[in-house]
Amino acid sequence: IEQNEAADVTMKLYNRLSALKGSDSIVYRKVAGKAMSANRQLSGRISRLGNKYILMVSVINGKTGNVIYNKTRSVAEADLDKTIDTFAAEIGGSSEIWETK
């Protein structure tokens, strides 16, 4: 997909997670303008295959490097926003992801 489409999906997920967890808990590295460290890193890819979007989202423990969330979904364009909402709800609602033992 085009870079601006990927950036749009990234911002939607960022905004939804910020709404769920508070803007002080979520940092968008490109907006911050400098290298930042975090105890959790959200990573993902989006591509298009025919009339479907393939979304891959992971959350990595910044200290250990372990993947603590990893999902892939294939969705129609009409379901893209709903899928972003689902990812945000799963990530935002998982105590395992947000605990920093």
Image (tube, rainbow, N blue to C red):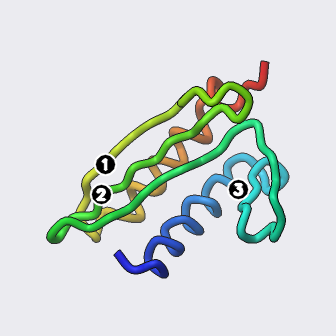
Q: Is residue 89 left or right of residue 71?
A: right
Mark 1 is surrounded, within 10 Å at the Cα level, by few (under 14), some (14 to 19) or many (20 or more) other residues, namely some
Badge number at residue 18: 3
Which quadrant of the view contains residue 30? Answer: bottom right
Secondary element at tag 3: helix
The answer to whether 34 appears left or right of 54 in the picture is right
Instruction: Check whether the beta carbons of the residues at disc 2 and disc 1 lie within 8 A of each other.
Output: yes
Pick whichever, 4 or 21, lies toward us.
4
Gap between marks 1 and 3, in whole Å? 22 Å
Residue 92's quadrant in the figure? top right
Q: Is residue 76 above or below residue 26?
A: below
Q: Residue at x 79, y 47 (%)?
A: 25
* Residue appearing at x 64%, y 53% in the figure: 17
Residue type at the position of mark 2: Ile
Mark 3 Cα-neighbour bin, 10 Å: few <14, some 14–19, many ≥20:
some
Residue shown at the point (63%, 60%) measured from the top left: 14
Residue 73 horizontal/vertical position (percent) = 31, 48
Q: Earlier in the sequence, mark 1 or mark 3?
A: 3
Return the x and y of residue 55 as percentages of the image width and height. 36, 55
User: What's under tag 3, amino acid-wise?
Assistant: Ser
Q: Are marks 2 and 3 in contact (CB under 8 Å)?
A: no
For image coordinates 46% across by 47% down, the residue present is 57
Q: Report how far apart the C-alphas of labels 2 and 1 lie in the structure.
A: 6 Å
Query: In the rendering, which numbered label is found on residue 54?
Result: 2
N-term-proximal mark, 2 vs 1: 2
Of all residues, the one furthest to the top in this rendering is 101
Q: Is residue 40 left or right of residue 10?
A: right
Answer with mark 2 or mark 3, whichever residue precedes in sequence.
3
Q: Nearer the viewer, residue 97 or 78?
A: 97
